[in-house]
Structure formats: structure tokens, C-alpha cells
Amino acid sequence: MPVTNIEKSPENLTMVVTSEFEAEPGRVWQMWADPRLLERWWGPPTWPATFVDHEFTVGGRASYFMTGPDGDKARGWWRFEAIEPTHRIEFADGFADQDGEPDDGMPTMAVRVSIGQDGASGSTTRMAIESRFDSIEDMEKLAEMGMEEGITLAIGQIDDLL
């Protein structure tokens, strides 16, 4: 039962993707903290990710690329701004050029990942990924690029890793 809800708010320039897993919060946390696990789910199944760097510390940076079915590469970067082990990650997220440097011509987002145990069941961990956009134009551009479908497909791969 990975993705349970997607809430888009053009007024607040946010999209929140909520998912639930039958696993302890620490195990779900590892999906972000361990770059080899992250590679196995970040990106839709037809666009697997390879993390070149993954310095999982405040101020650290991650760089990655996803390889499409025809060999095309889409590159991205993260800059970690807050990390609260097993509970919260905040990072700046953007596209990168061929050298892995930020592509200033593409939108960036502020992302907040929240992980916590569902109080009702006690055995379910809830993960919410909130993406905050700089403008409605950026939000619309990423929607047109398939962001919602891509993140839904990506998160759908986590259950098999838990």
C-alpha cells in the first residue's frame, strides 16, 4: 500500500505525497540514508538511478543520474539542509547538467521528508514527501514532465526492499 494520497496545492506551491509501509520507521529511513538502497527505488522502474555522491550530512550533497530505456540520462542533485535521523530530511532538489552541476535553467524545489509511525495501527510507518516550488510555473512545468507519476512509481518499489 505504498502511495495513499497525493495533495497538490497551487495556492501554497506544494505537492505532498503520502505513503505507508508495514515496516519500522528506521527501516524506511534506510531507504534514504543508504545510497545503494536509494538507487533501487529512486526513479521510475524504467529510469533507474545511480548515485555518484551521497554525503548524507547537513550541508552535504548528493548527485545522481537516472538512465532511461534508450540510454538517455537525466541528472539531478540534492543539498541536505536538515537531517533528524529516522524522522526527517530536508533538502534542496534540482536538475543537473552533464557535469553534475546545477542546471539554472530548470526548476528547483525544497523537499521535506517526514517519517513516523502511524499512531492508529502502531505497525505502519507513514512517509510524507512535501515538495515546495518557487512558482506556479515551476510547479506546472514539473507536473508536465510527469513528476507525480514518476514519484508514485518510484515509491511503489520500496515495499519489495523492506
Image (tube, rainbow, N blue to C red):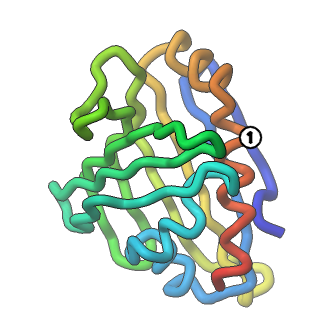
Identified at 74% across, 40% down, the residue is: 149
Q: Position of residue 35 (x, y in %)?
A: 39, 71
Identified at 30% across, 33% down, the residue is: 98
Residue 1 seen from this side: yes
Q: Nearer the viewer, residue 100 or 3?
A: 100
Identified at 74% across, 43% down, the residue is: 6
Q: Nearer the viewer, residue 36 or 86?
A: 36
Residue type for callout 1: Glu
Identified at 51% across, 62% down, the residue is: 114
| Crowd tier of the residue under label 1, counting other residues whose Cα lies within 10 Å: few below 14, some 14–19, many 20 or above | few
Q: Position of residue 120 (x, y in %)?
A: 78, 79
Tell me which corner region of the image, top left, top right, bottom left or bottom right, holds residue 4.
Answer: bottom right
Image quadrant occupied by the C terminus: bottom right
Q: Nearer the viewer, residue 14 or 57?
A: 57
Vertical side of 72 occupied by 46: above or below: below
Q: Position of residue 155 (x, y in %)?
A: 67, 60
Answer left or right for 17 relative to 81.
right
State the count of labels.
1
Q: Which residue is mark 1?
A: 149
Vertical side of 86 occupied by 48: above or below: above
Answer left or right for 153 relative to 110.
right
Residue 119 seen from this side: no
Vertical side of 37 occupied by 54: above or below: above
Outermost residue to the top: 137
